[in-house]
Amino acid sequence: MSETAPRRSRRRRTSVIAAAAAGIIATTTLIAVGTMSAHAAESSPVGFASLNGGTSGGSSSTTVTVTTASALKSALSSSTSQTVRVSGLITISGMYSVASNKTVIGVGSGSGITGGGLNLSGVKNIIIRNLKFTNAADDSINVQSSTTNVWIDHNDLSNGYDGLIDIKRGSDFITVSWNRLHNHDKSMLLGHSDDNASEDTGHLRVTYVHNWFEGTGQRHPRVRFANPVHVLNNYYSNIGSYGVASTENAGVYVERNYFENVATPTVTQTGDSDSGNLKVLNNYKVNSGTEQVRNGASVAAIPYSYTPESNNTVKATVQAGAGTGKI
């Protein structure tokens, strides 16, 4: 789908979090961004998903293990706060809806979903971890319609039809961490369309940290309206089109990432969208071009405390720790 076409309605060691964002007080949470071991996976999300009351997912005392599409669909849509353990690679058709207060986690390194994806619409408090997503007929993970407090962590996503992780339509307080994305073009959309300012402005606050974009084309992420968006300590390797795009007056802070073989690490305009605001700090570049920037007060301050990893170590850390089988 082109950059300008409307999106379909069914798709879209440690420091203390102690700050406030837009009048919302952060809960006290430990954030492990910088000097942690690559394999020491966080037990709770860092960044925006730790705000607004935090993201705890479903109850760990109520657990169901699923091995079939029908059992998966039923468990995901249940009103019960629970942990859904996905065992094996389950073939589904279409998008399965995920209800509030769910942890969806893969068993081992090869469990997950093929043929379809997960739809989070108007829900809250969701954790998606350690899952393999491949060959989705639409989006692999679609977050939309004012969904809040989502943590998407340590997944492997590839070869979908549209977006791998799309976030849109007023959704907020989300962290996307330690995911490996590969064999795909349009990776991550943030913001539905150019005419959706009324719904998206003031929302879509997302932290992207320690993800590995491996040979993907574009949208890592591609942002509209959101401010701030924090793109921190990610590894970009052999990117086809561009790394990060800020459009439609968005404010994106691209900090201490590792770009290798990326001709255009960042852009402030793409498609027919109006330009956005983008500032960069200490990105590490190997055989890569110069970032496009629009610095200024229009990129809002990051509203949480964090300790970033040194830019030159990001590649090794992310390669060792991103994807499934690492938690």
Image (spheres, helix red, strand yellow):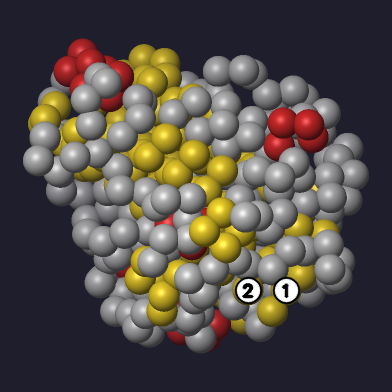
Relative image position of residue 22 (x, y in whole percent): 65, 55
Label pair 1/2, CB-CB below 8 angstroms: yes
- Please tell me which residue lies in front, 256 or 112: 256
Amino acid type, residue under disc 2 in the picture: Glu
Q: Quadrant of residue 257?
A: bottom right
Mark 2 residue element: strand
| Picture coordinates of residue 327, whole percent (x, y) | 22, 59
Name above or below for residue 219 compared with residue 299: above
Query: Hey, what amino acid is under mark 1?
Result: Val
The residue under label 1 is 280
Write down the residue under mark 2: 255
Q: Earlier in the sequence, mark 1 or mark 2?
A: 2
| Residue at x 40%, y 52% (from the top left corner) | 54
Give the vertical position of 295 relative to 243 (above or below).
Answer: below
- Quarter of the figure with the N terminus: top right
Residue at 24 percent of width and 38 percent of height: 58
In this picture, residue 77 sits left or right of residue 178:
left
> For this rendering, which residue is in front, 132 or 124?
124
- Mark 1: few, some, or many residues within 10 Å (few <14, many ≥20)? some
Q: Residues within 10 Å of mark 2 (few under 14, many from 20)?
A: many
Q: In the shown orientation, is residue 163 left or right of residue 199?
A: left
Q: Quadrant of residue 113?
A: top left
Numbered disc total: 2
Q: Secondary structure at mark 1?
A: strand
27 or 131, which lies in front?
27
**Rendered residue at 54%/82% (across/down):** 311
In this rendering, the answer to whether 78 lies above or below 267 is above
Location of residue 89 in the rendering, given as x and y in whole percent from the top left corner: 22, 32
**Corner quadrant of residue 28:** bottom left
